């Protein structure tokens, strides 16, 4: 019988885990809508849809078409079929995560629905890696998605109303990302070495347009805890990326990191919501947001950078604003969470 | 380096896992609303709220008060504080699982949101057990909830409209269940020995009142696959319980089990949605449903039966209808999933 200590050997510090045999991303895909395709990372995506409908008759069906497509491209790149995959972990922003559930029906893999709002990408990678490294699966498919029009009409106003947006508002990314994770004996690719799971924080933000402010403290808390748990410094990473704080949220995170944690991440700190659009030429206000933001930037841009040898060790901290239309209409604050995963090229 | 086979040693058959050192339920709690308290299982619950508001000013806040209360009672019974728990896994029926996210903020434990509709209870137990047995956690808190009034107004009509219900309609249970799972060196209690994760099935049901029919095929598929994976017979279990098929759904499951799988579960087959209400005296039509249904019946009734020595091995198959108001208003079918866990007293 193993000792107690050995049994929990993969725990590191208070909120982090280390993988004994780091699971590998053996195939990944990012598909996006037209605006994301026209942005500076357009060349890194596997597929760009020419319009928001993606050949479907509703925005919701378009979103799930994108997630399904990302899943099948990721499996194709991994050289596997659905019957070779043990679990499908997916989540999205739509009520009752219907993009994920309907995709799960199409891929036909045992399904575990997850929800972490825009932190879902990192949550899925962390959980999927735990299931593989724990010996419960040999391959796991993870996916998440968001769609500008389905999100806007659910969370705020139907896009047809043409409502004015505040300068700190973000633009929900239309896109989906998927990755096949596998135990390291089953293939090559970037490795998931650590994960840090975040606590839910509520700093009193109530404005559903100001999600960057709601999420920045959660990102700072998870980055701080991650470095503390692993005994690392920011310079141990080539890149530290938050998921979708966008320009206002990233600036707030920089200030909070300095003030509350004495940390200066320097140039290595980027935000997927800033990277995905051209803030000068594209009318996206503060920048991108949504589950699809960190997923498409990670599976498109970052993995391409790793393949090119320009990026070796990435800390991805995806942030989620855990509001619902009901909760903010009832006048409640917006709680937020951030989950981190370390990906090594 | 371990061999490939040893590395995935906990996989059993196509969709099941077996735990090497089965995690233990060291504390659990079930809290319910007034109707559930007046039902035949009233004496098995930890707390009965005298009204649906639970001292709050909205149904949504009442639901999260119930989940929070169940969490703290479960931790108290386990003799642990939140800082001794590594992860909080929770889900519920409300859009963006706000009951769970807001509870996560109160308990202050790193949070992994999950969504499997009414299958969430089994999904949480399965995932929590994997995180512990995989060596990533020593204790995990799992929870789920549902509330009749918050669910009715979200999924169907505001209860104040007094809409007529069809005889096969179900009554969403008001209640929450929570359990502290721990590695077996940390306490005593019922053990989680196996889990079977379900695929999402769509048999063409479109009526949001007829969830029993949507979910019954998923339950049958998971029960059949579970027995196949483990090489077991129904008589290897003292009780096989579906989560919330209610009377019509259970009858359908019995017929499908016989027709499609040649299985007769006999008297050992019960449904939590049938058990929780008195179908003669309480006006609940087909019976109970909701995440809170299987959770409160499991953490109340079944665990009490185990403690009394009347129940030794339970297969709990919690079923979830993965619709959203948007998906059914857009005329789509209701996909369903069922996850199974084996609990041994």
Image (cartoon, coloured by chain):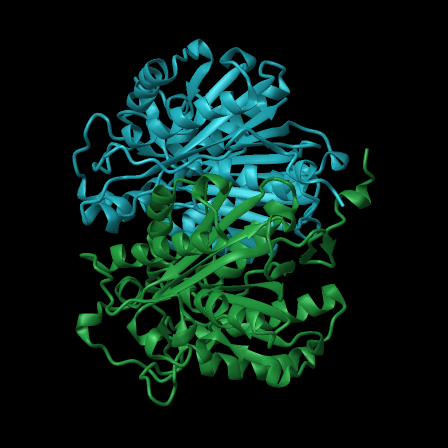
Chain colours: A green, B cyan
Is A316 on the left-hand or right-hand side of A230? Answer: left
Q: Residue at x 66, y 50 (%)?
A: B86
Residue B333 picture location, percent across and down:
24, 40
Q: Is residue B126 above or below residue A330?
A: above
Q: Residue at x 63, y 15 (%)?
A: B309
Is A302 on the left-hand or right-hand side of A105? Answer: right
Among the 4 quarters of the image, the one containing residue A16 = bottom right
In-front residue for pair B84/B41: B84
In-front residue for pair B1/B291: B1
Residue B182 picture location, percent across and down:
68, 39
In-front residue for pair B10/B76: B10
Q: Residue at x 54, y 33 (%)?
A: B46
Q: Is residue A163 visible?
A: yes
Is B9 on the left-hand or right-hand side of A275? Answer: right
Residue A340 picture location, percent across and down:
59, 64
Q: Is residue B204 above or below residue A72?
A: above
Among the 4 quarters of the image, the one containing residue B218 = top left
Residue A137 picture location, percent across and down:
58, 41
Tell me the quarter of the image containing the C terminus of chain B: top right
Q: Residue furthest bottom?
A: A280
Is A185 on the left-hand or right-hand side of A114? Answer: right
Q: Is residue B50 visible?
A: no
Q: Is residue A141 above or below residue B166?
A: below
Image mark count: 0
């Amino acid at each position: 019988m193993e000792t107690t200590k050995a049994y929990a050997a993969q725990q590191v510090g208070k909120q982090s885990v280390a993988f004994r045999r780091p699971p590998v991303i053996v195939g990944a895909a990012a598909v996006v809508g037209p605006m994301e395709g026209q942005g500076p990372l357009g060349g890194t995506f596997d597929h760009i849809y020419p319009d928001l409908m993606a050949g479907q008759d509703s925005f919701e069906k378009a979103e799930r078409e994108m997630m399904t497509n990302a899943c099948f491209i990721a499996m194709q790149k991994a050289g596997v079929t659905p019957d070779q995959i043990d679990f499908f972990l997916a989540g999205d922003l739509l009520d009752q995560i219907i993009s994920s559930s309907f995709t799960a029906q199409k891929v036909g893999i045992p399904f575990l629905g997850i929800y972490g709002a825009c932190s879902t990408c990192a949550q899925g990678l962390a959980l999927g890696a735990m299931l593989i490294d724990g010996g419960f699966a040999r391959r796991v498919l993870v996916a998440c998605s968001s769609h500008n029009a389905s999100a806007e009409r659910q969370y705020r106003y139907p896009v047809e109303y043409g409502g004015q947006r505040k300068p700190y508002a973000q633009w929900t990314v239309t896109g989906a990302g998927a990755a096949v994770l596998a135990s390291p004996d089953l293939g090559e690719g970037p490795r998931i070495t650590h994960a840090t799971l975040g606590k839910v924080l509520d700093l009193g933000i109530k404005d559903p347009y100001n999600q960057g402010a709601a999420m920045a403290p959660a990102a700072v808390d998870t980055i701080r805890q991650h470095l503390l748990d692993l005994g690392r410094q920011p310079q141990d990473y080539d890149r530290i990326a938050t998921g979708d704080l966008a320009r206002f949220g990233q600036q707030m995170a920089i200030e909070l990191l300095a003030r509350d944690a004495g940390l200066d991440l320097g140039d290595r700190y980027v935000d997927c919501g800033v990277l995905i659009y051209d803030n000068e030429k594209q009318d996206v206000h503060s920048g991108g947001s949504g589950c699809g933001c960190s997923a498409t930037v990670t599976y498109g841009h970052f993995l391409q950078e790793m393949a090119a040898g320009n990026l070796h060790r990435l800390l991805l901290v995806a942030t989620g604003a855990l509001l619902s239309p009901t909760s903010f209409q009832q006048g409640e604050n917006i709680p937020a969470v951030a989950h981190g995963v370390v990906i090594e090229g």
